[in-house]
Amino acid sequence: MPSKTAVNKTENNQMLLGLHTYSLYLHGIGQAWAGFNLPWERQLSTFQLFDLGIELGLDGFHLDDGVLENLEPSFLKEVGAAAKEKHLYLEYNMSLDLGNFGIGIQHNLEEGLDTAHFIGADVVKISMDLPRPRPRAGSRFHQEVMPFLQQTADLLEKTAPMAEEYGICLALENHCDSFSEEILWVLNQVDHHYVGACIDTVNAWHIAEDPMKAIENLAPVAFTNHFRDDRVEFCRDGFRVRGVAVGDGDIDMQKAYEFIKNDSPTKRINIETEMGISLEDKDTALHLEIETIKKSIHYCRTILNIGKDINKIS
């Protein structure tokens, strides 16, 4: 299991603030997810993304595989060099797609590690995206789920030596398909100090798990995170969950941050937003997506005091 020692230390042991690039999926650089098709062309190149990060005062990016225009080693090395020149950390995000949903770039874990190595990333986040029987809320360690959890453990155990050789940590996410206890079960099976978790602060809702309990469970073994907030809105036939800027929703983001800051081996917070913005007007949609990110950064910098320079964002 991961040790309490920070895996990505910074000067003065300060938290850095980055962005999960899925937050820019309306700009065409998010991971393919849930059959979503963008009705307009991609708006940002990888290198324009880095410039935007500098403009926003970010310290790095948690990259969806959809950000990279191609996976040729020569291009990936250019990406890594550009990030290093701009002093941006990089993490790589990929899916095993065990449920065959067609999520993200379909390459195996070894190829994902090679990609991360070439761009200079020090974390590879992995989601299982496994099929789950109903009722979802009652399916923790279900007999139909266990073979996928064991398959994941076997894959992680096989690739852990390669990850250690590269100096890249593997982080298994509590995606909307898995309970925190199941993530911990997989990690205990592997039992390798380069294999840990990725906390998504909202995803537990998808399977009716208490998000705060999931954050608390995973923080001690989490190499990275998706720092995300949603709002529950009640209506006549039940409720819906709506994406909001960090700090505007029903997740206690201050408490979530305390768990990560005090218990997690990472020294980074990666903002994630997904607003469900109308696609009727491209310019309005793109503007709202950026404004939501800016509002989230402002909250993290000024309320939570995250980052090496809290004066970057006014």
Image (tube, grey):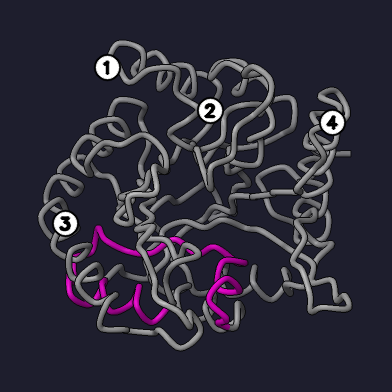
In x, y percent, where is residue 79? 43, 19
What's under tag 4, amino acid-wise? Glu
Which residue is label 3 attached to?
155
Q: Along the polypeptide, which appears first: circle 4 or circle 3?
A: 3
| Real-space CA distance between mark 2 and mark 3, rounded to the nearest whole angstrom | 32 Å
In x, y percent, where is residue 30? 56, 35
From the viewer's perspective, is the residue at label 4 or at label 3 nearer?
4
Q: Along the polypeptide, which appears first: circle 1 or circle 4?
A: 1
Query: Which labelled disc corresponds to residue 202?
Result: none
Find the magenta span and give its range: 180-209
In the image, is residue 199 part of the stretch drawn in magenta?
Answer: yes
Q: Secondary structure at mark 4?
A: loop
Q: Secondary structure at mark 2?
A: loop
Up-down relation of residue 138 to residue 287 (above or below)? below
| Real-space CA distance between mark 4 and mark 2, rounded to the nearest whole angstrom | 37 Å
From the viewer's perspective, is the residue at label 4 or at label 2 nearer?
4
Which residue is label 4 attached to?
280
Q: Which residue shows up at 48% across the image and 79% down it?
A: 136
Compared across the picture, whether 279 is left or right of 124 comes to right
